[in-house]
Amino acid sequence: MTSNPAQSTQINRCCDNAFTLGPLQTGPACCDPEPVIQVKNLSLQYGTKTALENVTLDIYRGCITALIGPSGCGKTSFLSALNRLIDLIPGCKVQGRILIDGNDIYDAACDVQALRRQIGMVFQKPVPFPLSIRRNIALPLHEHGIKQRAEVEAIIEQVLRDVGLWHEVCDRLDTAAHSLSGGQQQRLCIARALALSPQILLMDEPCSALDPIASGVVEDLISRLRGRYTIVIVTHNLAQARRIANYAAVFWVKERAGELVEFGQCQHIFETPAHELTASYINGIRG
Amino acid sequence: MNKWLLYRDSLVQWLIYLAVLAVSTVFVWILIDLVRGGVSHLSWDFLTESPRDAGRSGGIGSILISTLWILMVALIAALPLAWTTAVLLAEFVPAASRFGIAIRFSLQVLAGVPSIVFGLFGNAFFSIYLGMGFSILSGGLTLACMLLPILVSTAEAGLRAVPQSYRLSTAALGMSQTAALVHLLLPAAAPALAAGLLLGIGRAIAETAALIFTSGYVDRTPGSLLDSGRSLALHIYDLSMNVPGGDQPAYASALVLVALLLCINILAMKLSYDLQRRRIIL
């Protein structure tokens, strides 16, 4: 190996503290809610089957909103409607409006790629691409016109630090992303989404495919992202929703179509649920 | 316990082994027969010289060159068509759509057409209608038609085997479908593309009937794509059917052909194995 000065400083930098992102508990943002996403009378249909019926809901800037409810009640469909990923499913019809910062994203003039750049998404199972760790993050950056090597490298380091992965991988950025553990892969995927500096993050059960320890790490990370990003998270883990979310939306299946039963501050939903379905769901009686 | 139940498993196992043995015996038998009949005739000169006296003496040098040229023409014509069709079928057309089903059906029919029919079509269309005559060009293009189904179906299967999550993830990152295809999906499907390519090459170099009426059977070294050229498989056919005393060189040529096919198949297996083991594709 050559004694490359740049390389040795890089390795030195690995040893300093992992997180650059402080635990931002931004009270004001959530106490003084300002809607970023406004969903109005949203209905989704797959062919003849109705997945979601007439959902109206505001998602507030800088807060974590948890979507909870039993399987098949349309939580994931709702999430993929927010970044129009649902367009990829043939035969899917969307009715109603979704406004992000006041712009209708289902408008014909909406630039879907720009929209998705603004909205990061993390899936249930980590999806690292079969590339090196470095290229996993660089590829989408290149696609969005960020090609300057120094800039790309800086972003890679920044986002890997943000997710607490930098000190674990900084000396092996060119190894396969698939060689990382499940929890690391999921954090890499979060970093990849953060690299495009989105303002909203959609997370579809990001912890459910991970072991308890990795799940804890990712959950902590999500809490740290609060305030900086607006986060919408689907989870089946009620305790997790209670720990991290500011707001919760309870979905339920009624007459074979998903519906929003109750939406409100997380604490209220869990302590003084207004709807009896919510009460029985969070107490483990139903669902 | 019922004794029959105990014996049944081992009986089934024996039957399976027997079937496998029968299959491999046929292959080994052919190989031994070819080696016994042809190895004495095989030499460096045989591989490099042109055939003399209708192939009774001399070698297969010019034949190998013609075969290679025909193969090149076929692949250059077929690969771009086949792989773009596969991309269309796997990425842009829903699997259950009428259009996709119609294309897939027509490819299946094409795959089932006997090669002699391809030969007649090639003769009528490329040689006569397009005026290419008996030439490497018309032979290669006829072979290209034959290869299309196998190349399309292997590439399509390879693309479909790439996890759907890659497509969703790239879309969620705001990447275009083209970028996803170029940077991720095609490289991930590369083992399948390579395997299909080698299968196609195997089919092409072993082809006889489609070439009789298209590339012809002139055994001189071709000077251009519009010259006639005799492929290896056709040479074997001619030696064993039309040339009295041609058995020895026919055996030797067949040995060369089978050795080539073996190499290609081993290469195909190794390539797809290696590519699949590699975890970084770029």
Image: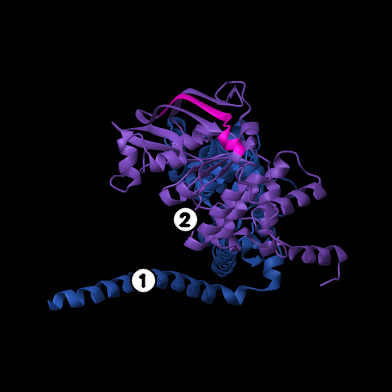
Chain colours: A purple, B blue
SS label for mark 2: loop
Magenta span includes A149: no
The span picked out in magenta is A28-44
Task: Tell me the residue that label 2 is attached to.
Answer: A209
Q: Is residue A91 above or below residue B17?
A: above
Task: Tell me the residue that label 1 is attached to.
Answer: B22
Residue that appears at 69% across and 47% down: A139
Which quadrant is home to the N terminus of chain A? bottom right
Name the one closer to the observer, A176 or A77. A77
Q: Position of residue A77 (x, y in %)?
A: 45, 36
Q: Is residue A49 above or below residue A195?
A: above
The image quarter in which residue B134 lies? top right
Which quadrant is home to the C terminus of chain A? top left
Kindly identify which chain the residue marked by label 1 belongs to: B
- A214 with respect to A191 (left or right): left
The image quarter in which residue B131 lies? top right
Residue that appears at 57% across and 48% down: B211
Q: Residue type at mark 1?
A: Ala
- Label 2 or label 1, whichever lies nearer to me, is 2
Q: Position of residue A80 (x, y in %)?
A: 50, 36
Rounded to the nearest angstrom, the CA distance separating label 2 from label 1 is 47 Å
- B18 with respect to A124 (left or right): left
Q: Position of residue B258 (x, y in %)?
A: 55, 65
Name the one closer to the observer, B195 or A66. A66
Residue that appears at 65% across and 32% down: A114
Residue B195 visible in the picture: no
Kindly identify which chain the residue marked by label 2 belongs to: A
Residue that appears at 60% across and 44% down: A226
Q: Is residue B1 above or below residue A197?
A: below
Q: Residue type at mark 2?
A: Ala
